[in-house]
């Protein structure tokens, strides 16, 4: 292998990435791809590629860049913690940032969610939540009560357990998964309901799906129900009004732990620290979070557990140990980054800002739905949006409609806006600091892209 050049050329970097870097979720046939955009710098809501072209970061990283890029305060906090205590084994030690952040999260979460288990990201937070349920039911002497109910199109992560409860089949092809541990509820997307059906009737049907499944499987075999407040990677699916409240109530009735996966909706995406209580009126047994916790500056996740669950877990056996953990649990630098991120969000009233700009964002989104025939549904909540292309199997453009997300993303990329494609959908979740004028710029570009695609699909 040739030695690394001191100053790599563009060509070197492309080659090395193609040859040695297996990206996540990469098409394995063509994993030696060289078309990843190499990004060099970022500031506010913008990122620049290596050639100097500027883009609005529509997806906000991967739904995670809340306070925007290039914050000196974040760099300072990270540097300061690195110089004082860059790492501490969580087996033996705690640190000031870990203790402070645990306390802060206990304050921010609803009800009696007061115990924080730090993780390395969202997948490990979900993994931990499921293991908490397993531990609990094993300790209570009911080892058969461990099936998890999840939902089609849900994304919960990439560890064995988190992937098991993920309801997106393509994420699991060719991997083994623990099918006997999970049951999936059918599609909850209101856009996919039968044409004549009201949203209320759709909600009743989805609740009936849950009750039927519980009756079929038996509540004594079901340990947990896991749901994102909004199915994000599943296409920003906003549940019908009352859905979460009713599912929560059913779980409580059957002693089924309710796990709210707030990896995307936590930390301001819907204008509140967490969406479960403040947006949807429920107090879960466990909340998982990650991403916006540090605004993506460093990796960190958390599984936050209620006192009621902790009291049942902590039994009388002195030798019992909660054998779950990671080398980087409560990593002090990540925790310091999270504390600074939260401080910035508080000082700049970013939650208030999100609530103030949301109506404009959602108006422009709905306007697209009313204006462009190719868009079957334009939906969202807070600073989350999705455009779902109308699928028309009889149309010559049907094959293109199925790739609408990638096509719209490519059209917008030319004009300086990035989106996140998912099949016939394009989603976006810009940094929460986005201004009204920047929201207009984003939607103007999307409309220009849609005008172009509409003409092509009609031709
Ligand atoms: N849960 C949800 C709802 C997510 O959207 C994601 C990531 N997109 C995860 C869990 C997994 O998080 P991570 O990639 O940090 O492991």
Image (cartoon, grey):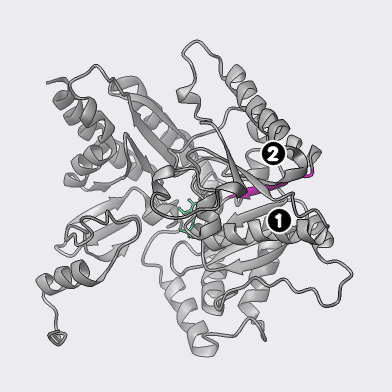
Horizontal side of residue 97 vs 222, given as left or right: left
Is 419 within the magenta?
no
Which residue does the numbered mark 2 point to in the structure image? 281
Horizontal side of residue 312 vs 208, given as left or right: right
Q: Is residue 92 visible?
A: yes
How crowded pointer 1 is (Cα within 10 Å; few <14, some 14-19, many 20+) is rated as: many
Quadrant containing the N terminus is: bottom left
Image coords of residue 205 (percent x, y): 61, 22
Q: Is residue 404 above or below residue 168?
A: above
Image coords of residue 98 (percent x, y): 63, 75
Which mark is first along the chain, 2 or 1?
A: 1
Horizontal side of residue 158 vs 402, given as left or right: right
**The image quarter in which residue 377 lies:** top left
Mark 1 residue's CB less than 8 Å from ligand 1? no
Residue depicted at x 57% and y 68%: 119
Write the start and end of the magenta stretch as one range: 255-261
| Secondary structure mostly taken by the magenta-highlighted segment of the chain | strand
Residue depicted at x 27% and y 57%: 28
Determine which of the numbered discs, if any, sits on residue 133 in the image. 1
């Amino acid at each position: 292998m040739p030695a690394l050049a001191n100053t790599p050329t563009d060509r070197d970097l492309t080659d090395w990435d193609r040859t040695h870097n297996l990206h996540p979720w990469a098409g394995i046939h063509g994993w030696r791809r060289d078309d990843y955009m190499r990004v060099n710098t970022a500031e506010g809501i913008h990122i620049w590629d290596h050639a100097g072209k500027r883009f609005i970061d529509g997806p906000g990283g991967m739904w995670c860049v809340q306070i925007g890029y290039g914050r000196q305060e974040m760099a300072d906090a990270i540097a300061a913690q690195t110089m004082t205590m860059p790492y501490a084994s969580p087996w033996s030690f705690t640190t000031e940032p870990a203790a402070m952040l645990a306390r802060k999260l206990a304050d921010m979460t609803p009800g009696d969610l007061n115990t924080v288990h730090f993780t390395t990201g969202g997948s490990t937070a979900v993994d931990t939540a499921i293991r908490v349920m397993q531990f609990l039911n094993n300790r209570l002497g009911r080892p058969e009560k461990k099936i998890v109910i999840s939902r089609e199109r849900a994304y919960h992560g990439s560890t064995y357990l988190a992937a098991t409860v993920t309801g997106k089949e393509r994420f699991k092809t060719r991997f083994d998964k623990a099918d006997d541990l999970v049951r999936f509820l059918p599609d909850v997307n209101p856009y996919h309901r039968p044409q004549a059906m009201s949203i209320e009737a759709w909600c009743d049907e989805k609740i009936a799906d849950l009750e039927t499944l519980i009756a079929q499987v038996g509540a004594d075999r079901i340990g947990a129900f896991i749901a994102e407040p909004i199915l994000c990677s599943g296409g920003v699916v906003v549940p019908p009004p009352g859905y979460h409240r009713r599912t929560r109530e059913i779980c409580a009735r059957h002693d089924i732990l309710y796990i709210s996966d707030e990896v995307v909706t936590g930390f301001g995406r819907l204008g509140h620290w967490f969406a479960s209580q403040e947006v949807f009126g429920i107090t879960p047994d466990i909340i998982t979070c990650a991403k916006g916790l540090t605004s993506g500056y460093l990796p960190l996740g958390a599984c936050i557990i209620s006192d009621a669950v902790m009291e049942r877990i902590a039994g009388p056996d002195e030798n019992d140990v909660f054998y779950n953990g990671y080398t980087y649990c409560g990593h002090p630098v990540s925790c310091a980054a999270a504390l600074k991120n939260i401080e910035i969000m508080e000082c700049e009233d970013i939650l208030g800002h999100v609530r103030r700009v949301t109506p404009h964002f959602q108006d422009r989104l709905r306007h697209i739905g009313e204006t462009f025939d190719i868009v079957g549904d334009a939906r969202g909540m807070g600073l989350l949006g999705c455009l779902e292309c109308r699928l028309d199997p009889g149309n010559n453009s049907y094959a293109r409609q199925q790739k609408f997300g990638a096509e719209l993303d490519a059209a917008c990329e030319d004009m300086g806006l990035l989106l996140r494609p998912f099949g016939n959908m394009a989603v976006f979740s810009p940094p929460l600091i986005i201004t009204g004028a920047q929201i207009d710029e984003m939607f103007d570009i999307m409309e220009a892209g849609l005008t172009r695609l509409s003409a092509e699909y009609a031709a």
